[in-house]
């Protein structure tokens, strides 16, 4: 079942429920009203009959009939009237052809009511019985509401016609409404069908007087913008990776062809082989970085990761940095001490986080003007913050936005003439994302760079 038919069906069921409840309510109210009104008429007829009979000491059918005809205009359909004395003996009945007697149970109930009338039904015949204590007379009157039931049947027919007609109109209206409501979606469907990997520029156009659907269109367009940037980043990544791989390969090919076309001395061959080895090491390092970046892209947070202390991890990463660069000067401190010893504990992969911090410390050393690094740690608001600072050329606003992208190298890296691929911070970002963490860059003052790693504390 498609969405349009389902929407029309739900709307029709909703309207049908309202119509059915309304019709049943009207029918029920009129049914009770008819019954109550006819009980009153039957009771009125019985009271009139009782008054006439009680006025005549020696009941005479002719006199009673004359008095009845003078006191009312017409009788009720299937009307039956009877008056009994205190012993239950019949005094008078109307019409004379009926056979009637006072039921002992009814007599006892009337005595218990203390003069109040008692109403009941047998089939569709409505009865009203009463007892007059001062003259000790029982009166029973009954009739059939022929006209009331006829009106009730007419009401049932009218309500059925109204329900059927309302449902027909509802079906027509619902399908018309659905067609009008889904027109923008159908138009958007055609636009979406034209969107391909080669053509991601198409966007859904807003529609007047459809704020909710425009919100959907805005969300879809925002998603398309993200996808477009993602595909653009992917193409750029492939181009940059190809360029990084092609350059050393071209150099290696050129050197190899030169060696084949010329007679070289042993020393020249040794230098050539050393150059080829350096290029090969460059390619191996680049390939390993690309493989690590691809591997960490699929990495996700694991709930069963062990708890580790960040302060101890930073100290270990600092020790590795000092082995790599003995002239590095690293100052480790605490900006704000946690309330308990558990404040610096996080859940994570020890090797990955150590690699991320070592990468940050290495960058801080390579791009520092004085080879000094400051590391400040704090635990606040269920977060662990590690700030790595160095003195050196700061990043511009444009560079700060791009510094986490693969293969991006800022002016400071170019000016420092350091080797690298621009993948280090990208790998750090992937590792931190897998640990539900993030990294931010600020420049508190001139020639002051700060990278802040924010990790969630372990909840135990």
Image (cartoon, rainbow, N blue to C red):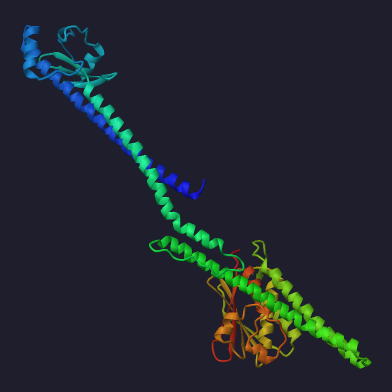
Tell me if I can see residue 315 in this picture.
no
The residue drawn where x is 76% and y is 80% is 246
Residue 59, quarter of picture: top left
Locate residue 20 relative to residue 85 in the image: left or right: right
Residue 61 location in percent, x, y?
9, 7
Residue 126 location in percent, x, y?
23, 20
Q: Nearer the viewer, residue 201 or 3?
A: 201
Relative to 335, is 131 above or below? above
Q: Nearer the viewer, residue 223 or 414?
A: 223
Locate residue 368 relative to residue 100 in the image: left or right: right
Locate residue 56 relative to residue 400 in the image: left or right: left
Looking at the rendered structure, the number of numbered marks drawn on it comes to: 0
Q: Nearer the viewer, residue 319 or 244?
A: 244
Tell me if I can see residue 326 in this picture.
yes
Locate residue 283 relative to residue 130 in the image: left or right: right
- Quarter placement of the C terminus: bottom right
The residue drawn where x is 45% and y is 55% is 182
Relative to 345, is 364 above or below? below
Residue 103 location in percent, x, y?
24, 11
Residue 365, quarter of picture: bottom right
Relative to 232, is 173 above or below? above
Residue 398 location in percent, x, y?
56, 84
The residue drawn where x is 86% and y is 85% is 256
Residue 376, quarter of picture: bottom right
């Amino acid at each position: 079942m498609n969405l349009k038919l389902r929407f029309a069906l739900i709307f029709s069921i909703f309207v049908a429920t309202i119509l059915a409840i309304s019709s049943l309510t009207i029918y029920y109210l009129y049914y009770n009203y008819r019954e109550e009104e006819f009980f009153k008429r039957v009771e009125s007829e019985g009271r009139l009959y009782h008054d006439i009979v009680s006025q005549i000491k020696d009941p005479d059918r002719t006199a009673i009939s004359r008095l009845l005809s003078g006191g009312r205009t017409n009788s009720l359909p299937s009307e039956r009237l009877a008056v009994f004395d205190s012993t239950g003996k019949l005094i008078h009945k109307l019409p004379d052809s009926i056979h009637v007697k006072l039921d002992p149970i009814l007599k006892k109930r009337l005595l218990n009511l203390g003069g109040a009338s008692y109403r009941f039904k047998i089939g569709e015949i409505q009865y009203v019985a009463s007892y007059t204590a001062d003259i000790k007379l029982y009166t029973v009157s009954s009739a059939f509401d022929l006209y009331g039931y006829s009106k009730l049947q007419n009401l049932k027919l009218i309500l059925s016609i109204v329900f059927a007609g309302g449902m027909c109109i509802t079906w027509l209206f619902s399908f018309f409404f659905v067609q009008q409501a889904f027109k923008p979606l159908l138009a958007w469907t055609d636009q979406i069908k034209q969107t391909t990997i080669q053509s991601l520029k198409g966007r859904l156009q807003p529609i007047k007087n459809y704020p909710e659907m425009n919100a959907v269109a805005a969300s879809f367009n925002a998603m398309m913008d993200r996808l477009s940037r993602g595909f653009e980043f992917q193409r750029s990544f492939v181009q940059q990776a190809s360029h990084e791989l092609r350059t050393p390969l071209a150099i290696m090919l050129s050197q190899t062809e030169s060696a084949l076309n010329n007679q070289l001395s042993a020393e020249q061959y040794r230098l050539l082989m050393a150059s080829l080895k350096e290029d090969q090491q460059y390619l191996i390092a680049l390939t390993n970085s690309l493989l690590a970046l691809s591997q960490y892209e699929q990495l996700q947070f694991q709930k069963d990761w062990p708890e580790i202390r960040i302060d101890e991890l930073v100290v270990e990463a600092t020790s590795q940095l000092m082995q790599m660069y003995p002239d590095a000067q690293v100052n480790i401190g605490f900006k704000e001490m946690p309330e308990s010893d558990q404040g610096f504990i996080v859940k994570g992969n020890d090797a990955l986080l150590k690699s991320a911090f070592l990468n940050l410390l290495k960058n801080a050393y390579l791009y520092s003007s004085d080879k000094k690094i400051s590391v400040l740690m704090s635990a606040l608001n269920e977060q662990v913050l590690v700030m790595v600072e160095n003195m050196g050329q700061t990043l511009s606003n444009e560079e700060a936005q791009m510094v986490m992208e693969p293969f991006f190298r800022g002016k400071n890296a170019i000016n420092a003439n350091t080797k690298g691929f621009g993948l280090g911070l990208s790998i750090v970002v992937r590792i931190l994302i897998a640990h539900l963490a993030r990294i931010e860059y600020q420049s508190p003052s001139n020639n002051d760079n700060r990278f802040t790693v924010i990790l969630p504390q372990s909840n135990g």
